[in-house]
Image: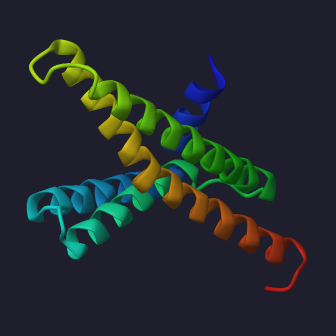
C-alpha cells in the first residue's frame, strides 16, 4: 500500500481522526457550496466563504500532523507551487490568445489558465498560511513556551 493510501486510510481509522476529518470535510463542503451559491465575482463575502472552505479542506487532510518538519515542507511546497502556478498561468494565458475563440485548443488552454490562476490565488496562499501558523505553533509547543 502506498504512503498516501495508508495516510488517507489512517485519517478514517482512528475514531478521533475520523470525527475531525468528517466534520472538517462537511464544513468545507458547506462553505464552498455557500460561496458558489452567493457568487465570488466581486463579492467579498463569497470570497471569504471560499477561502475558509479551502482552509477547512486543507485542515481535514493535515490535522493529525504533530511535527514542525511537516508544516515547513507544506510551506516550501506552497511557495514553490505558487511560483510555478503563476508561470503556468501566464504561459497558458499567452497561448490561449494564439488560437481562435471557437477551437478546441482555445477552450483547453483557457481552462488550464483559469485552473492555475485559482491554484495561485486560492489554494497556495491558504496552504502557506497553514504551514507558517502550524510551524510557529509547534515550535512554541516544542520549546515549552506554551503549556
**In percent of the image, x 37 and y 66: which residue is there?**
52
Q: Splitting the image into 4 quarters, where does residue 36 fall?
A: bottom left
Closer to us: 91 or 35:
91
Q: Is residue 96 above or below residue 75?
A: above
Q: Is residue 84 above or below residue 112?
A: below
Residue 19: where, in percent of width, then height? 43, 56
Q: Total label count?
A: 0
**In percent of the image, x 60 and y 49: which residue is there?**
78
Closer to us: 103 or 30:
103
- Name the image quarter holding the N terminus: top right
Most extreme residue toward the bottom, as rendered? Answer: 146
Side of 125 relative to 66 (left or right): left
- Name the image quarter holding the C terminus: bottom right
Regarding residue 57, the answer to whether it shows in the image is no
Most extreme residue toward the right, as rendered? Answer: 143
**In percent of the image, x 42 and y 38: which residue is there?**
89
Most extreme residue toward the front, as rendered? Answer: 98
Q: Splitting the image into 4 quarters, where does residue 144 fall?
A: bottom right
Side of 3 relative to 13 (left or right): right
**In percent of the image, x 16 and y 63: which residue is there?**
34
Residue 97: where, in percent of width, then height? 27, 28
Amino acid at each position: 500500500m502506498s504512503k498516501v493510501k495508508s495516510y488517507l486510510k489512517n485519517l478514517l481509522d482512528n475514531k478521533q481522526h475520523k470525527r475531525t476529518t468528517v466534520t472538517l470535510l462537511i464544513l468545507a463542503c458547506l462553505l464552498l457550496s455557500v460561496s458558489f451559491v452567493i457568487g465570488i465575482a466581486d463579492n467579498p463575502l463569497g470570497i471569504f466563504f471560499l477561502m475558509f472552505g479551502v482552509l477547512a479542506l486543507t485542515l481535514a487532510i493535515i490535522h493529525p500532523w504533530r511535527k514542525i518538519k511537516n508544516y515547513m515542507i507544506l510551506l516550501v511546497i506552497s511557495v514553490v507551487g505558487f511560483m510555478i502556478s503563476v508561470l503556468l498561468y501566464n504561459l497558458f494565458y499567452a497561448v490561449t490568445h494564439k488560437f481562435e475563440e471557437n477551437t478546441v485548443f482555445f477552450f483547453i488552454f483557457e481552462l488550464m489558465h483559469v485552473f492555475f490562476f485559482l491554484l495561485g490565488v486560492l489554494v497556495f496562499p491558504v496552504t502557506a498560511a497553514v504551514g507558517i501558523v502550524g510551524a510557529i505553533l509547534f515550535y512554541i509547543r516544542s520549546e515549552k513556551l506554551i503549556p
